[in-house]
Amino acid sequence: MTIRVKICGLTEPSAVAAAVAAGAAYLGFVFFPKSPRNLAIAQARALALDVPMGVAKVALVVDADDATIAAILDQVPIDMLQLHGHESPDRVAQVRARFGLPVMKAVGIAEPADLDRLPAYEAVADQILVDAKAPKGAALPGGNGLAFDWRLIAGRKWDKPWMLAGGLTPDNVAAAVRLTGARQVDVSSGVESAPGVKDGALIRAFVAAASA
C-alpha cells in the first residue's frame, strides 16, 4: 500500500530535491517567524519554482491574517494552505472562500476529549492534519518531535482525507500507519540532522518505511 508522504519545513534546494526524488506527495513551506524552518517569501518562491508538477506545495501559516496569506500567494505558487494555529472553524471557512485553495487544518491531540474538536473542522476543511498537541508554553504549534497515543485514533474513520503527524520518524512510521490506518503522513523534525536542517538519507528512509 502506497502511503502519501508530506515532508514539511523544507528550507534548502537540496532537501526539496531529495523529497521529490524520494516520492513525497506534498512539500511543506513554513511561514512562521518563531520556527527554525521559517522562510522569507523570496526564499519560498525560489524553492517552490523547482517543484515539479504533481507534487503539492503547501504553505503552513499560524493564525495568519488575510494580508499575510495574500502576500505569500502573490509570490509563491502554492497548491494548499495549512492552518496550524488556533484558527476557528469559521476562520478556516473564511480562508478557503477568500483564497480559493484547498485548506488543511491541523488539530492537536493529547487526550480523547481533543477528538471532539475534529468534526467541526472536518465540516469546513478539505483535509485534516491529526497532530500531537504542543505542550503548554511551547513556542511552536508543531514540529516539536512529539507523538501522541496513536491508539486514540485506531480504527477511526473520517469523511475527509486526513494526515497523521507528530513525532514520526523512519523508525516508527510503519508502526504508526499499521495502528492508525493512516493513508497520509507528515514529517518535519523526524527527518532532520539539526533543527531546520533536513537530511536527504532520512527523507529517503522515511518515505520508504511509510509504505513498507
Image (cartoon, grey):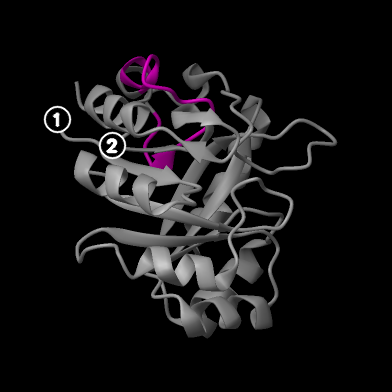
**Of the residues shown, which amino acid type is indicated by label 1?**
Met
**Of the residues shown, which amino acid type is indicated by label 2?**
Arg
From the viewer's perspective, is 109 left or right of 208? right
* 65 versus 112 height, above or below: below
Q: Which sits in the foreground, 172 or 92?
A: 172
Whether the magenta-drawn stretch holds residue 104 is answered as no
Residue at screen point 17% across, 35% down: 2
Q: Position of residue 171 (x, y in %)?
A: 38, 14
- Which mark is on residue 1? 1
Would you say the magenta stretch is mainly helix, strand or loop? Answer: loop
Look at mark 2 in the image and give the residue it sits on. Answer: 183
Q: What is the magenta range?
A: 156-176
Q: Position of residue 193 (x, y in %)?
A: 50, 27
* 165 versus 150 height, above or below: below
From the viewer's perspective, is 42 left or right of 102? right
Residue 3: quarter of image: top left
Q: Position of residue 151 (x, y in %)?
A: 48, 17
Q: Which sits in the foreground, 40 or 63?
A: 40
From the viewer's perspective, is 44 left or right of 194? left
